[in-house]
Image (cartoon, rainbow, N blue to C red):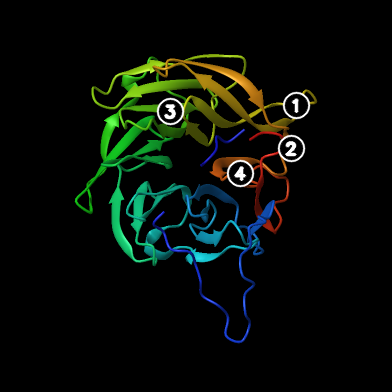
Amino acid sequence: MKTLPAAAAAVLTAVTVGVPRPAPTDVRPDTYVVSRAPGVLPEGLAVTASGTMYVTSSATGAVYRGDTRRAGLRPFLAPGVDGRTSAAGVRVDRRGRVLVAGWTTGTLFVYAPDGTLLARRAAAPGAALNDLAVTEDAVYVTDSATGTVWRAGLTGGRVGALVPWVGPDDFPAVPVFLNGIVVDPSGRVALVAEQGGERLFRVDLADRSVTEVEVSGGRMGADGLLLEGDRLYGVVNEPDGAGGTRFLVNLARLDQELRTAQVVDRSRPVGIQRSPTSVARDAGRLLWVDSQLFATTPAPPFTVTEVPGLR
């Protein structure tokens, strides 16, 4: 998902004429090449239960797709098409639709598995849509520019208008930069990370009340979030002790009501040249996007890799 400055989807099966593609195997790569083109800067990541992977480009708005059993992704949505000049979060709903948060346009894009545009829903002018969480009947999107959580209904195959569900004044204090968002299986409670302010919020999606989650043992002011039962994973950055920044995934245990979070484990950190953003589950491992957003000189290939030292 866009970071603070300082399975119903079909697997892509097209082949190049005369060049057979190797069949997938049960042995999965530890590195995936999103693109070898310069300036892609991948950011958002979604992996379906069947192993279909989607990765967005924050720099161009392109979306790439692949299979977690193969090491290379291919273009799914071309850059700039439909006004997608920059893309952050990406999710797949239960109908197999691909939902993309348009960062610079403040627009939610919804696509069919074949890449057909189904809906385009704009937030207010000046919005910067970042991360998404999908429930059975709605999608919730964080807006980093205005401190708003937007909602669009997903009922009867239709995509409703984006409406502000929680605004900046609903938080205990106006948030610095909303980023990662997840929703519990009931669809009633969202956890929203404030990157930079290093806070985690609990949002009751029915009455729209917001409280701060009591976090201990480490940071959860995360970029990408992943919720699995009482386990919350967050991609965070922190000082490396030498004047720089390092990136890692923290694992926190939540209480039953999702009001407290205790960081109990962490991945091995990586440096600013990789600048990981989103995290997703693929079977028994975690994957993250090496965005290179803060690299001195971003350079291809742009990749998705396994999170080191944490499952």
Looking at the rendered structure, the secondary structure element under dot 2 is strand
Q: What is the residue that sits farthest to the front in this orientation?
A: 26
> Which residue bears the numbered disc 2?
271
Does label 2 or label 3 sit earlier along the sequence? 3
Amino acid at the residue labelled 3: Val
Marks 2 & 4, CB-CB < 8 Å contact: no
Q: How many marks?
A: 4
Q: Is residue 57 above or below residue 271?
A: below
Marks 4 & 3, CB-CB < 8 Å contact: no
Mark identifier at residue 240: 1
Marks 1 & 2, CB-CB < 8 Å contact: yes
> Which residue bears the numbered disc 3?
192
Residue placed most toward the observer, 72 or 195:
72
Residue placed most toward the observer, 83 or 51:
51
Amino acid at the residue labelled 4: Trp
Mark 4 vs mark 1, CA separation in Å: 20 Å
> Which residue bears the numbered disc 4?
288
